[in-house]
Image (tube, rainbow, N blue to C red):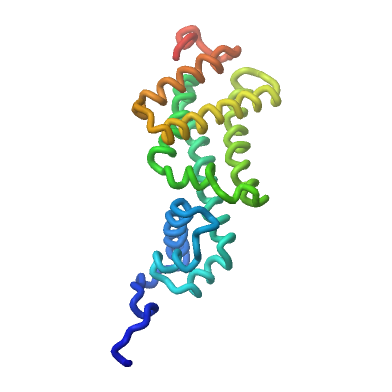
């Protein structure tokens, strides 16, 4: 009997990590499990096993599965929103600013598809806390874009917000379709097409700061 190892003893363990590093590791492992299986089919047992920790360790960081999911979703939402703000701040040239913002969505889909699916294809969107986080991605991304539109065009807050929400939809819905449909277009081709479409629309609004040399650029 002494020679028989239990399943728990056989489970590989990771080395001890500082609390913040362990939390980050658990979130990364959970991301993969939730994306693969969805919220309802995922189990804390499997997340703990993949992370190489005991369930008590997992529960020390996240009291329950929903707490873990919300923490992961919040992190993913923050990444997207910060990416939009970074894209907007990357240049003061508006055609390039539009392209940088569209690129953000396609890069996020292509390079971090798991996070993107977690946010926009969650099987738990009927939960109020989850819905609030997903809606925050759209609203805060649009608010950042609307601020730029207001400053450059003098449009009302309501008009700028509507245009901004439409641009966000063009970015993330188009990027999701490009990925899910396995388009024959390359990432650069897709970004170029959508950026041109977006700029032809938003570039038509008056901009008192636009110089003649940039008028009509795409």
Q: Outermost residue toward the bottom?
A: 1
Q: Quadrant of residue 190?
A: top left
Q: In the displayed structure, would residue 100 be above or below residue 18?
A: above
Q: Nearer the viewer, residue 132 or 155?
A: 132
Side of 160 where 61 appears, left or right? left
- Marks counted in the figure total 0
Q: Position of residue 148 (x, y in %)?
A: 58, 26
| Residue 31 percent coordinates (x, y) | 46, 54
Residue ID at (43%, 31%)? 178
* Residue in the picture at 68% in, 22% down: 159
Find residue 205 and report its image quarter. Answer: top right
Q: Vertical placement of 124 versus 82: above or below?
A: below
Q: Is residue 42 left or right of residue 112?
A: right
Q: Which residue corresponds to the image point at 65% horizontal and 48% vertical from the top-left?
A: 126
Of 107 and 95, nearer the camera is: 107
Q: Nearer the viewer, residue 54 or 127?
A: 127
Q: Which image quarter holds the N terminus?
A: bottom left
Classify residue 112 as left or right of residue 72: left
Q: Is residue 119 above or below residue 200?
A: below
Q: Quadrant of residue 66?
A: bottom right
Counting from the top left corner in percent of width and height, residue 39 is at 53, 55
Q: Quadrant where the C terminus lies?
A: top left
**Farthest-out residue, left:** 3
Q: Is residue 123 above or below residue 199?
A: below
Q: Residue at x 47, y 28 (%)?
A: 102
Residue 74 percent coordinates (x, y): 56, 51
């Amino acid at each position: 009997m002494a020679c028989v190892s239990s399943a728990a003893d056989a489970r590989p363990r990771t080395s001890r990590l500082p609390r913040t590093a362990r939390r980050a590791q658990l979130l990364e492992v959970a991301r993969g499990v939730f994306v693969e299986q969805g919220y309802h089919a995922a189990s804390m047992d499997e997340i703990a096993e993949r992370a190489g920790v005991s369930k008590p360790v997992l529960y020390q960081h996240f009291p329950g599965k929903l707490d873990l999911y919300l923490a992961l979703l919040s992190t993913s939402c923050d990444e997207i929103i910060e990416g939009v703000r970074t894209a907007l701040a990357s240049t003061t040239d508006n055609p390039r600013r539009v392209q940088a913002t569209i690129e953000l969505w396609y890069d996020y889909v292509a390079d971090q598809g798991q996070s993107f699916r977690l946010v926009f294809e969650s099987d738990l969107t009927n939960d109020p806390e989850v819905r609030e986080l997903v809606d925050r991605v759209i609203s805060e991304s649009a608010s950042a874009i609307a601020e730029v539109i207001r400053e450059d065009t003098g449009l009302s807050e309501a008009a700028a917000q509507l245009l901004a929400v439409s641009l966000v939809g063009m970015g993330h819905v188009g990027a999701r379709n490009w990925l899910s449909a396995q388009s024959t277009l390359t990432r650069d081709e897709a970004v170029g097409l959508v950026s041109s479409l977006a700029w032809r629309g938003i570039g038509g609004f008056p901009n008192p700061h636009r110089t003649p040399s940039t008028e009509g650029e795409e």
